[in-house]
Image (tube, rainbow, N blue to C red):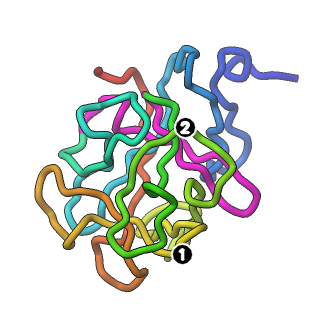
Amino acid sequence: MKSFWGRCGVAALVGVAVPGVFAVPVHGQERGLLDLGYQLVNANSGKCLTVTAGGLADNAILIQKRCTRDSSYRWRFERAGADYRIVNVRSGKCLTIAGDSAEDNGFAIQHVCGGGPAGQWQVSGRSLLTFKDVQLENAHSHKCLTIAGGSAGENGVAVQYNCDAESSRRWTAKLTVGPALD
């Protein structure tokens, strides 16, 4: 039996809220009443991962900016086997690494979601249930999402780099509900 939220296009929460339960398609459809999603907050800068200028196009570069309620700052986690696709609430496109790069400093972009490992992520770290202080490791390159040069500045560019203890390679996912202000 579908819940009210399931009929409205928003995934129903059953039991414990765990990453992956918010698998709601958004591309070409209404985003739902709550614009439910996570803000990905960088541990080093305290800034949120977002799409440059809130863009909708494939290959738009991802950056960090001061967190706002805009839907381009919200992400959903969809299970993809043992990994996750990380989908932008506004565009419906997936966090991926440009050109399927396996090199350090490969740009993080948004791109139409597909089945390839460059658009899939493993979540590892201290607390998977609260999704605090975790690393997002690309399933293709086995490198972690980070901000270039460990920058704490506005508009720092998201890239991939070797996974290590640097705080710029750790993220907290803050569940954000309510209408987006975009």
Q: Position of residue 112 (x, y in %)?
A: 54, 37
Q: Amino acid at mark 2?
A: Val
* Real-space CA distance between mark 2 and mark 1, rounded to the nearest whole angstrom: 21 Å
Q: Position of residue 102 (x, y in %)?
A: 48, 72
Q: Amino acid at mark 1?
A: His
Q: Position of residue 52 (x, y in %)?
A: 26, 39
Residue annotated with mark 1: 142
What is the secondary structure assignment of the residue under circle 2? Answer: loop
Q: Which residues are magenta?
A: 68-90
Farthest right residue in view: 1
Farthest bottom residue in view: 164
Task: Please tell me whether residue 53 is drawn above or below residue 47 in the rendered image.
Answer: above
Farthest left residue in view: 153
Mark 1 surroundings: few (<14), some (14-19) or many (≥20) residues within 10 A: some
Q: Residue at x 51, y 16 (%)?
A: 33
Task: Please tell me whether residue 141 is drawn above or below residue 42 in the rendered image.
Answer: below
Q: Residue at x 24, y 56 (%)?
A: 157
Farthest front residue in view: 99
Q: Foreground residue, 110 or 38? A: 110
Q: Foreground residue, 75 or 117? A: 117
Displayed quadrant of residue 53? top left
Q: How many marks?
A: 2
